[in-house]
Image (cartoon, rainbow, N blue to C red):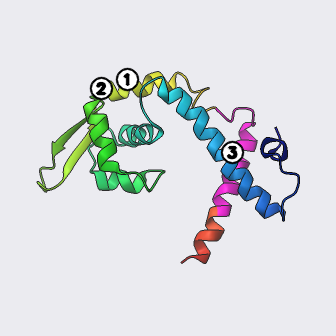
Amino acid sequence: MKLEEAINQKKFSHEWHKATINILYTGNWLEAKIKKTLKQHNITVQQYNVLRILRGQHPDPISTSVIRARMLDKMSDASRIVERLNKKKLVTRTPCPQDKRLVDIIINSQGLDLLKMIDLEKEKVEFVLNNLSVEEAQMLNELLDKARKGREAQHK
């Protein structure tokens, strides 16, 4: 469905305005699709993001500050998310041997098993955009990277 139809708006002030609205609308659409899948597993998008970060780090532990820096949603409270994952028995928290003020977090076997189960449903999570060809997805990635690069350069 075209953006104009989806939001019932016929005109935009210029193509950059339309592209901005389209990215926001599509981001919300993607998040809703992903939330629907994750809800079946009783985890949030932010918890899924943390579990994926921990899986990428596995078997090495990392601190909540490293998790926070790597999270997609920079406004999320990494400590609270880790605590919820710990209560769900998906991660293990241990005192950092080098600095007792820090806590090391590692994904455990239950967390890895949950991610494997979600991975089997990739058509629902990672392949939401599978109506694009591989080349189109690569182009989209390049364009989005380019869009962010232009804004990042202006704000430095």
**Is the magenta region chiefly helix, strand or loop?**
helix
**Rendered position, 78 above or below 12:** above
Q: Which mark is residue 26?
A: 3
* Secondary element type, mark 1: helix
Q: Label 3 neighbourhood size at 10 Å, few (<14), some (14-19), many (20+)?
A: few
Kindly indicate the quadrant of the structure image that contains residue 123: top right
Q: Can residue 38 be seen here?
A: yes
Give whichever of discs 3 and 1 has the lower sequence position.
3
> Between residues 55 and 45, which one lies in front from this camera angle?
45
* Residue 16 screen position, x and y as percent: 78, 63
* Secondary element type, mark 2: helix
**Dot 1 amino acid type:** Asp
**Dot 2 amino acid type:** Ser
* Secondary element type, mark 3: helix
* Residue 48 screen position, x and y as percent: 44, 37
Structural distance between the alpha carbons of marks 1 and 2: 6 Å
Quadrant where the N terminus sits is top right
| Residue holding disc 1 | 113
Q: Nearer the viewer, mark 2 or mark 3?
A: 3
Furthest toward the front, the residue is 8
**Circles 1 and 2 in contact, beta carbons < 8 Å:** yes
**Rendered position, 89 above or below 28:** above
Magenta-highlighted residues: 128-147
**Dot 3 amino acid type:** Thr
Q: Nearer the viewer, mark 3 or mark 1?
A: 3
Residue 89 as seen in the image, left or right of residue 102: right
**Rendered position, 9 above or below 52:** below
**Magenta stretch contains residue 20:** no
Seen at 84% across and 65% down, the residue is 13
| Residue holding disc 2 | 109
**Rendered position, 156 above or below 115:** below
